[in-house]
């Protein structure tokens, strides 16, 4: 019998993408024996109405530049190309339809975001075909009370020391004229300066 493919879907705003995200995806690929990891920059996140987010086309381009050197990483414009709100349920449904029952899907993202998705109304349907890998910074404590027993079984925590790097710190550093070298791929750093990203106050 053919083994099921195990596919990671790496969701995030990636504003900008940095080495913490790349280390997370590679660690998840290794630990969970994933065939590949598909990076899906978020389109119009329902929980990000207050902060201006860099246009999807630019976040998509930075994600492509950052992942090009890893043969197991691919990038999907699925959320960025859609005008409507990006709910993880809809995104995962689309990948579930594309890969069918022969694939096992793992949604990889930050632990706080996983908790938020878990409180979403269609979660029972979602966990029927999807598991979650919740990446945390060292020392993070997951609020177990937020997860029912059934949900907890579908969530694996993964501590990633490289997540000491954060997108908000990188944006802040660019605004202050501080260096961002060695926090993210050089191509992404060059893209940020060439296109004048993160210069204005948020
Ligand atoms: P966020 O709230 O901006 O981030 C929460 C924390 O997780 C931050 O520390 C962030 O660090 C980190 N993080 C985000 N993506 C990560 C990744 N792929 N790997 C490791 N750490 C990550 O989260 P977000 O980027 O907006 O959302 C993450 C994903 O969850 C997106 O795909 C989003 O669409 C989805 N989401 C869906 C719903 C829903 O369907 N209702 C609700 C919330 C989130 P950085 O700032 O450094 O990235």
Image (cartoon, rainbow, N blue to C red):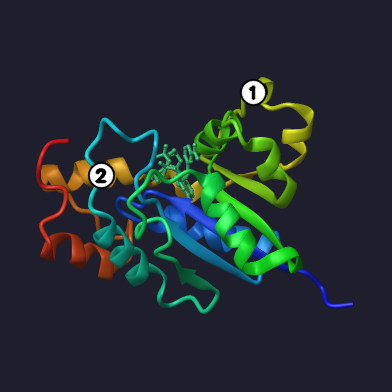
> 45 or 31: which is nearer to us?
45
- In this view, the residue farthest toward the right is 1
The residue under the point 68% across, 27% down is: 147
Secondary structure of the residue carrying tag 2 is loop
Report which residue position mark 1 lands on: 146
Give left or right: position of 152 versus 71: right
Give left or right: position of 118 versus 180: right
Give left or right: position of 196 versus 11: left
> 78 or 71: which is nearer to us?
78
- Residue 109 visible, this orientation: no
Quadrant housing the C terminus: top left
Q: Contact (CB < 8 A) between labels 2 and 1?
A: no
The residue under the point 36% across, 44% down is: 166
Residue 106: where, in percent of width, then height?
64, 55
When the figure is inspected, residue 38 is found, relative to residue 68, above or below; the finding is above
Which of the four quarters of the rendered structure image does ligand 1 lie in? top left
The residue under the point 61% across, 58% down is: 28
When the figure is inspected, residue 5 is found, relative to residue 8, above or below; the finding is below
Residue 79: where, in percent of width, then height?
41, 56
Report which residue position mark 2 lands on: 53
């Amino acid at each position: 019998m053919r083994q099921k493919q195990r596919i990671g879907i790496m969701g995030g705003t990636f504003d900008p993408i940095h080495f913490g995200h790349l280390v997370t995806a590679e660690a998840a690929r290794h630990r969970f024996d994933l065939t590949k990891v598909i990076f899906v920059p978020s389109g119009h996140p329902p929980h990000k109405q207050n902060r201006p987010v860099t246009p999807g086309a630019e976040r998509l381009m930075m994600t492509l530049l950052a992942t090009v050197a890893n043969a197991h990483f691919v990038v999907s414009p699925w959320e960025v190309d859609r005008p409507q709100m990006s709910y993880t349920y809809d995104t995962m449904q689309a990948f579930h339809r594309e890969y069918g029952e022969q694939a096992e899907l793992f949604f990889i993202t930050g632990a706080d975001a996983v908790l938020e998705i878990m409180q979403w109304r269609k979660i029972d349907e979602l966990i029927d075909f999807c598991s979650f890998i919740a990446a945390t910074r060292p020392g993070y404590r997951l609020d177990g009370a937020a997860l029912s027993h059934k949900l907890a079984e579908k969530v694996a925590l993964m501590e990633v020391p490289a997540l000491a790097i954060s997108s908000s710190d990188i944006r802040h550093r660019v605004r202050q004229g501080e260096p961002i070298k060695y926090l993210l791929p050089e191509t992404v750093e060059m893209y940020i300066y060439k296109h004048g990203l993160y210069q204005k106050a948020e």
